[in-house]
Amino acid sequence: MKFATACLVALTFWVASSADARVISDPVGLASQCVSISAPKDKVVVADGPLGYGTASKGAATFFLKPTGLGTYMLYEKKARLMASIDKRVAVTDSPGPVAEFAIDPAGGGFTLAPTDGHGRLTATQDGRLELIGGRLRDSQIFHFSSRPKCQAFPEAGVGARGPNFHGTRKGGSVFGYTDSHLHITANLRAGGRVIHGQNYDRFGITKALGDDASDHGEDGSKDITGNLLRTGLPFGEHDTEGWPGFTGWPTNDTNTHQQVYYRWLERAWRSGLRLVVAQTVEDEPICEIEPVKSHTCDETKVIKLEIGKLRGLQNYIDAQAGGRGRGWFRLVGSPSQARKVIRRGRLAVLIGIESSNPFGCSEQNDKPACTRKQIDRSIKDLRKQGVRTMFLAHWVDNALAGPAPEGGVKGAFINVFNKFQTGDWLQVTDCPDPAEGEKLESLSPVEIQVLSSFFPKTAYLKDEELPEYPDEPQCNRQGLTRLGAYAVRKLMDNHMLIELDHLSERSREAVLEIAEKRDYPLVSGHTGTGGPWSADKLRRLYRLGGYASATPDGAAGLTDKILSFSKYRAKGRYFGVGLGTDTGGFSTLPGAPEETTDPLKYPFRSYDGKVKFGRERTGTRTFDYNEDGVAHYGLFPDLLADVQRQPKGKRALASLFRSAEAYLRTWEKANRR
């Protein structure tokens, strides 16, 4: 713990005249406000040396009230000083954390301030000191807050957007805005919690959420083994680990193992017209198990529950920044009608999904399923109670329900290790049903297995295993939808759950489509083309069912073409819109900086609807520029869309994109009707 060491005479505070002050009586008015604090007999709280505070008739200290949660705050002064409770005394610290957190509650026409460690309430004593005293409420513990026009704000990432958000509906009642149907807001909790560094928020602020990542990746980044493998195919590598405040090392568009969905960056995307997000909670037990360092369990069911709790915590935190419960722009929803209400108000509707290797605990070892029909029934009921509304049946490895689509390249070879580790077998492949499907599979060499096992000791036994050989042509997974998987599909439909078709093996995808066609039940492809390419025939069938598909990220020209390419599959008479499936946080790469051009994106630019004006996004001391950084983090998607708007067919593509929130809701509504 660090303590401020400057003496009182070295500190200066901005002091307002009484004419500038306005007494705050409503708790809603406290969040992120500059205030002075008055004790009984109109004495104001002042700095009182390096280790505390006192009261005096003038010389008020001005505090910035930084919410840490609903009803809790840090009181922040100049020079990074925070009021604190240390050893049951009122003190000063420059380290955000539990000792600097106070609960502020209305009482007696004013407010009480109590450290959340439970050691009494702030009390003004007869001799003008501040102490912490417990027991019954007394008059000396009731304080008043007066607003001040300026002070030093607590550090936070900028949004770089000004102007009114679009709210209401289009003519005819449809909602306006775009969807990201595959976003990993809580990805830092996957793979054991020590692979992806950085959090989407921390109650004690950005310095904690996005600090230096040496604790996870080592001083030089060399411990970022999984990130190195996913980027280059080799476990070796180094990177600059500085996060806040300079961000010289991360985030970058091609990182796989650093936080890219900090809540203020998500807020910037919302300001550009993002109105519906599917927050995919995620875990893969095999990758978690082989990771040498972990912060929590590898049990997928427990990790998913942990991530759902984190999403609810994020909603509460954003509410707190806005002044109280229900006031924030981030709203978890459990039905299409709730989502419509949220979007009409101009807020962001967030639907909870699951992308995991063993849904319902249905793993498979040596062809033996680890779950039963009763377990599936109980799990679906429990997940609905938790707010989950959409699911994958498989992700990276074979399970008791279905096989996954193989992935190519080094990443696919790495994933195949997970399949062997989880199931006891390498992926078994065969010719594909359609020439447009399948991937060329690679296999690790004995030398690569030797190197891999030195970094992941749990894979050492693979050195003695026979390695698979695959044909030099696209192949598909032999495993399709199992009987237990078909049962799970029907039970999900009975419970009005949306079913994701991406990552399913080609045979599994075909089987699910056939069940859906018999029931006229809509399906979803949340990041189309990821986890196996789609054939034209299957996409047409998806749309005929009233289903939803999305474009994965690309540069401005490529994204324009991707969005427009879906139009040839649309079904007659169906509402049509194409959203994004960014897979941000999903061990995936975002678009890099545009190629050198004589016509770079100019700042400021305006949102597609023309209402919001965007400048460059600034976090800490770093200013991000799309022309140089590409989509380095999620907050730069507005910049990418502004570049799309400049393309020859860009406005046409964006017209389809901004119909995607309505398109997704119609798919969801049809699932609910069935």
Image (spheres, rainbow, N blue to C red):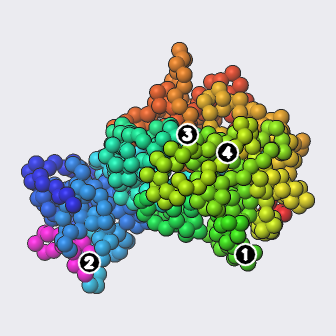
Residue 625 in percent (x, y) is at: 46, 30
At 53% from the left and 31% from the top, the residue drawn is 592
Q: Is residue 106 magenta?
A: no
Label 3, label 1: how far apart the Cα atoms are: 37 Å
Residue 574 in percent (x, y) is at: 85, 45
At 69% from the left and 58% from the top, the residue drawn is 398
Q: Earlier in the sequence, mark 2 or mark 4?
A: 2
Residue 101 in percent (x, y) is at: 31, 65
Tell me: residue 634, above or below residue 186: above
Q: Earlier in the sequence, mark 1 or mark 4?
A: 1
| Rendered image: mark on residue 469 | 4
Say which quarter of the image contains residue 75: bottom left
Q: Mark 2 and mark 1 in contact (Cβ < 8 Å)?
A: no
Mark toward the viewer: 4 or 3: 4
Asked if one can make out residue 237 in the rendered structure from this viewpoint, the answer is: yes
| Rendered image: mark on residue 310 | none
Asked if one can make out residue 664 in the rendered structure from this viewpoint, the answer is: no
| Rendered image: mark on residue 120 | 2
Image check: 431 left or right of 121? Answer: right
Q: Quadrant of the N terminus?
A: bottom left
Residue picked out by circle 1:
372
Q: Earlier in the sequence, mark 3 or mark 1?
A: 1
